[in-house]
Amino acid sequence: MLNLVLFGPPGAGKGTQAIYLKKKYRLIHLSTGDLLRTQIAAKTELGIQAKLFIDKGELVPDELVIGMIKVKLNQCANIKGFIFDGFPRTEEQAKALDVLLNENNTPFSGMLALEVEKQELVDRLLERGQTSGRSDDADVSIIENRIKTYHVKTAPVMDFYAKQKKKYSINGMGGIEDIAQRLNEVVANF
Ligand code: UDP
Ligand code: MG
């Protein structure tokens, strides 16, 4: 099994690159952001809760996100592995993922951390906001809050995996194909 965490700030290109990795290695793409937006569209209790946080650029509480991942892992038998996109976003979530993978007797392969300059992130998100219909992409102050939240709460997850020697930094600036190639050079060795 190949279980990858695709990591990086908002706008780093996780969703875009997940599509390449998913195809090449036949993995299941689990984007917690996409899963939450599905819940919001369906107006479920989880969606209604999550929307309160997402609209402000804050994180959805750990227990809600971890619960959602747990359900997904249990639904998938006989697969080649997962790409976790946008999860874990806190150290608590990273610890929970370790436990869940252990319970499912499946290894953690590595964290791929996409590194992108701040101004490039803001530019990409504003551009995406013109077509994505996502309220959290449309407003500069919400984008700034998402990036700040990333630095305060999510960036420590890099140290968590670095200590386990499972963190791989990838330059996320430049063309999509070039970045896909850089990711592939790392994943091919897992
Ligand atoms: N979010 C969250 N936990 C998750 C996934 C998403 O709290 O595990 C929330 C958070 O408010 C985030 C928003 O959903 O700003 C959008 O997440 P997504 O991963 O789609 O955004 P991206 O980082 O890819 O732009
Ligand atoms: Mg995304």
Image: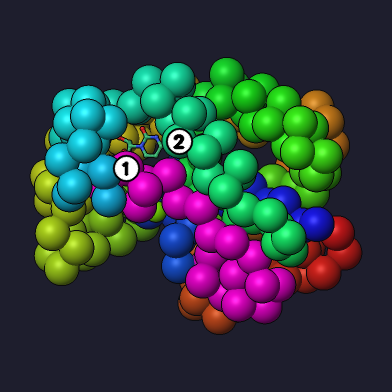
- Measure the alpha-carbon separation of dots 2 and 1: 9 Å
Our reading of the magenta stretch's main secondary structure is helix
Task: Give the residue pinned by disc 2.
Answer: 68
Contact, mark 2 vs mark 1 (Cβ under 8 Å): yes
Q: Amino acid at mark 2?
A: Met
Where in the figure is residue 183, as x and y percent of width and height? 68, 66
Where in the figure is residue 74, as x and y percent of width and height? 61, 42
Please identify, in this view, whether the residue under mark 2 or under mark 1 is nearer the observer: 2
147 and 5: which is toward the camera: 5
Q: Quadrant of ligand 1?
A: top left
Q: Amino acid at mark 1?
A: Leu
**Side of 81 where 106 appears, left or right:** right
Q: Earlier in the sequence, mark 2 or mark 1?
A: 1
State which region is magenta: 17-37
Disc 1, ligand 1: is the CB inside 8 Å?
Answer: yes
Please tell me whether residue 20 is drawn above or below residue 67 in the rendered image.
below
Q: Residues within 10 Å of mark 1 (few under 14, many from 20)?
A: many
Q: Specify the quadrant that holds the C terminus.
A: bottom right
Where in the figure is residue 164, as x and y percent of width and height? 83, 31
83 and 142: which is toward the camera: 83
100 and 56: which is toward the camera: 100
Residue at 82%, 69% (x, y): give it.
188
Task: Give the residue pinned by disc 1.
Answer: 36
Hey, which quadrant is residue 79 in on the image? bottom right
Where in the figure is residue 144, as x and y percent of width and height? 25, 36
Residue at 80%, 27% (x, y): give it.
163
Residue at 15%, 68% (x, y): give it.
131
**Side of 98 where 106 appears, left or right:** right
**Tag 2, which secondary structure?**
helix
